[in-house]
Amino acid sequence: MKKVLNFIMDNYIIFFVYAFIGWIYEVSWYLIVRHKFVNRGVLLGPYLPIYGFGILILLLILKRFMSKKHYSSNIIYTSISIFTIVTFIITTIIEYTTPKIYSVSYYLEHYGFILFIINILFIVLINLYIKKSNNNKIKNIDTTIVLVFLAIWIITTLVEYIAHYFIDVYSHKLLWDYSRDFLNINRRVNWDASRNFAIGGTLLLYLVQPKVDKFLNNSKYKKIVFIILIIVLLFELLIKII
């Protein structure tokens, strides 16, 4: 019973921590880009639930994977890492050197083949180099962070797409619209947002989450924080009902 209670408390606190960080991220974006304060919270408080749920999903899927090392001596890990890095670099260059490309199909039609060829070239050359190299440092490069970055990119994109779909279908509201943004898919997700989530998610899991775990494992105030956050949620629900 104690383990179950700790599990609930830990994940509830984690949810609120990242919901708050997500709120700060979106409010800061509006302040910097549009020079005005916009409360992006869907509730009264300074938090966005989708970010809290997003991090919980990432931890559920990736925590065990992150605890192990995945070395460049494995051709699969190396190939996926090269594909991720090369695609990221080339697409970013295309984004900032060409007119806006809204359609993914247009992008693949005009740049997909050359992107594929460049990726294959890099994957073959680098894997051959690693295979023939006698340098153990080259063979033992830890590719985990790149693999995690790619996984976060895919997962957060799916979460955002699904969230947008259900909000659109059931509430008929468009909380965000990417129809005029670079590489958007059905206006629900786009390149910039997914890239930022991947970068931000990687930084959070590697830099912030260890500190959150330390607090949850050692703090005497965990129960107090949990109770305060329960009261906050109940207050929100009460206001909604009223």
Image (tube, rainbow, N blue to C red):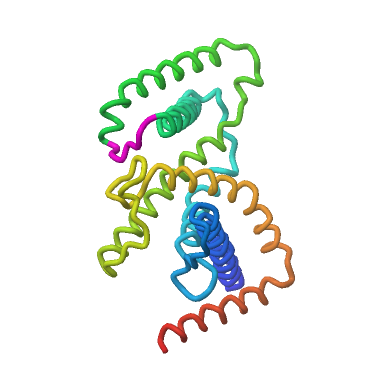
Which residue is at 46% across, 18% downward? 122
Classify residue 222 by image quadrant. Answer: bottom right
Q: What x and y, as percent, mark residue 226? A: 61, 74
- Image vertical order of residue 168 relative to residue 200, above or below: below
Residue range highlighted in magenta: 98-104
Which residue is at 36% across, 18% downward? 117
Classify residue 219 by image quadrant. Answer: bottom right
Name, please, the residue furthest toward the front.
Answer: 35
**From the image, which quarter does the C terminus lie in?**
bottom left
Classify residue 80 by image quadrant. Answer: top left
Judge whether residue 235 is colored magenta. Answer: no
Residue 76: in sight, yes or no? no
Q: What x and y, as percent, mark residue 194? A: 43, 46
Q: What x and y, as percent, mark residue 50? A: 45, 61
Which residue is at 30% across, 62% downward? 166
- Image vertical order of residue 142 relative to residue 159, above or below: above
Name, please, the residue furthest toward the bottom.
Answer: 242
Left or right side of 20 for 168: left
**From the image, which quarter does the N terminus lie in?**
bottom right
Left or right side of 172 for 237: right
Q: What x and y, as percent, mark residue 146? A: 53, 35
Q: How many marks?
A: 0
Secondary structure, magenta segment, majority class: loop
- Image vertical order of residue 109 relative to residue 147, above or below: above
Left or right side of 56 for 178: left
Residue 190: in sight, yes or no? yes
Judge whether residue 103 is colored magenta. Answer: yes
